C-alpha cells in the first residue's frame, strides 16, 4: 500500500521520468506483482519513462526493455533484455543470472511422482 501511495505522490507533478529504487523489495509475491502491474499500466497509459533500480534480475527481465548491470558502482554490461539474458558477455552477469531462482523442469515436480496406485 505504501508503494502505491508513494507512486501517486511522485506522479502528482506529472514527471516525464519516474525513478523507482527497489519498488518491490521486502514485498510478498502477490503485492510485488500488483506494484509491477501498476507501474507497467502507468507507463503504457501515460508514456512516462521508468528507471527501475533493482537487485532482482527476475523482475528486471520481466518489466524492462533494457538492462544495465552494475558492479562496484560501475556499469559492466548494458543492452536489450534479450541480449543480456540470452547472451551475456560478462562472467559477472552470467553469475547473476544463474542465481535467479527457477522452478525447475516440470518432470521433477512432486506431482510427477504420483503413481497409478495413488489415483
Image (tube, grey):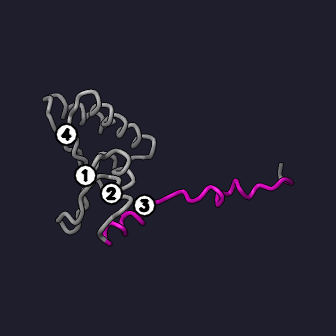
Compare marks 3 and 2 and give the one earlier in the sequence.
2
Residue at 35% over, 40% down: 36
Q: Nearer the N terminus, badge 1 or badge 3?
A: 1
Q: Foreground residue, 10 or 107?
A: 107
Range of the magenta residues?
A: 91-117
Q: Nearer the viewer, mark 2 or mark 4?
A: 2
* Mark 1 and mark 3: Cα distance apart in space: 16 Å
Residue drawn 38% across the image and 47% down it = 62
Residue for badge 2: 83
- Residue 88 is marked as none
x, y percent for residue 119: 83, 48
Name the residue tied to disc 3: 100
Earlier in the chain: of badge 1 and badge 4, it is: 4
Question: Could you tell me what secondary structure mostly forms the magenta stretch?
Answer: helix
C-beta proximity under 8 Å, tags 3 and 2: no
Residue pointed to by mark 4: 18
Identity of the residue drawn at 28% across and 52% down: 80
User: Which residue of the protein is positioned furthest toward the right in this rendering?
Assistant: 117
As for residue 79 lying within the magenta part, the answer is: no
The image quadrant where one finds the N terminus is top left
For mark 4, give the secondary structure: strand
The percent position of residue 32, horizontal first and vertical second, equals 39, 43
Pointer 1: what residue? 53
Query: Which mark is in front, 2 or 1?
Result: 2
Pick the residue in front: 77 or 96: 77
Q: Secondary structure at mark 2?
A: helix
> In 3D space, how far apart are the residues under numbered discs 2 and 4 (Cα atoms)?
24 Å
Q: Position of residue 37 (x, y in %)?
A: 37, 36
- Distance, label 3 to label 2, CA atoms, is 17 Å
Amino acid at each position: 500500500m505504501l508503494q502505491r501511495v508513494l507512486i501517486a505522490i511522485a506522479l502528482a507533478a506529472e514527471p516525464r521520468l519516474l525513478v523507482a529504487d527497489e519498488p518491490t523489495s521486502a514485498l510478498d509475491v502477490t503485492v510485488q506483482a500488483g506494484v509491477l502491474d501498476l507501474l507497467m499500466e502507468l507507463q503504457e497509459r501515460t508514456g512516462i519513462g521508468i528507471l527501475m533500480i533493482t537487485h532482482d534480475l527476475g523482475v528486471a527481465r520481466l518489466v524492462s526493455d533494457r538492462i544495465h548491470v552494475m558492479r562496484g558502482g560501475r556499469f559492466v554490461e548494458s543492452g536489450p533484455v534479450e541480449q543480456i539474458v540470452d547472451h551475456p558477455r560478462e562472467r559477472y552477469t552470467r553469475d547473476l543470472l544463474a542465481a535467479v531462482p527457477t522452478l525447475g523442469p516440470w518432470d521433477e515436480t512432486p506431482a510427477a511422482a504420483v503413481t497409478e496406485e495413488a489415483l
